[in-house]
Amino acid sequence: MNRKEIKERRQFLLNNLLKGLSYLVLLVGVFLLLRQFSTEDQRYAWFGPIYDNAVLVISLFILSEILFGIIPPEVFMLWSLETGMIGPYFFSIGILSLISYGAGFLNFNIGRWIRDKNWINRARFPRLKKYMRLFEKFGGYLVVVASLTPLPFSAISLLSGMGGLLPRNYLLLSLFRILRYFLYALILSGIDNL
């Protein structure tokens, strides 16, 4: 790999990390505003039916993680922080991160399964084309970036399987997903004390 490619990879990671941090700042801002300008009773009236149903929330999380991250994982981290319904905060973050890791591996295996299916290769879903070009350019490095940033981790996992990344390599590279959860959890737990 030459210097230009290294610089390009570094810039790609940095740009996506900055997007992720700005999104996190926005989400935390909304969270703090809700806390500041509403009472606990008001928040409970708005979110209680959902917040109190751990099975529903975890089911939504699993579905979201499989279906290309429809709901950002930080929302579920905040839910865990606020409710403690699946145990102490960092224990629940561990559970959420393992669910995300497992959902990514499921999508990776689905990608491996559909790799040789002609009807899917002809369809080439437009939303995935952009990420397929990125995967062709960055390979396994894209898995690391998607694990740490707001890039759709599940979609990248699917493309990694379709692109022929070895399962062992995928599993190692996607461990950064667990790191992301704990780093964000540290930030969110610090904000909770404000």
Image (cartoon, grey):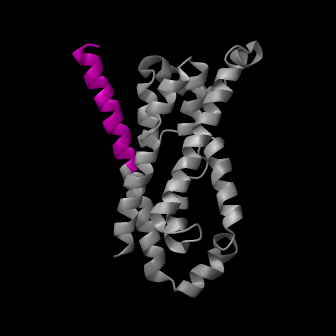
Classify 184 as above or below 88.
above
Q: Identify the magenta region.
A: 1-20
State the image coordinates of residue 16 (x, y, percent, origin top left): 38, 39
Q: Is residue 33 above or below residue 106?
A: below
Which residue: 55% across, 54% down? 96
Magenta span contains residue 8? yes
- Judged left or right of residue 44, residue 73 is left
Examine the rendering and report whether any part of residue 20 can be seen.
yes
Dividing the picture into quarters, in which one does residue 55 lie? bottom right
Q: Residue furthest left?
A: 3
**Viewer-side residue, 34 vs 90:** 90
Instruction: Farthest residue to the right: give it.
Output: 119
Work out whether 89 lies above or below 39: above
Horizontal and vertical percent position of residue 164: 56, 17
The secondary structure that most of the magenta stretch takes on is: helix
At 40% across and 46% down in the image, what residue appears? Answer: 179
Q: Is residue 79 left or right of residue 182?
A: right
* Horizontal relation, residue 62 to residue 140: left or right: right
Q: From the image, which quarter does the C terminus lie in?
A: bottom left
Quarter-wise, where is residue 57 in the image? Answer: bottom right
**Nearer the observer, 12 or 2:** 2
Is residue 9 inside the magenta stretch?
Answer: yes
Q: Is residue 190 left or right of residue 78?
A: left
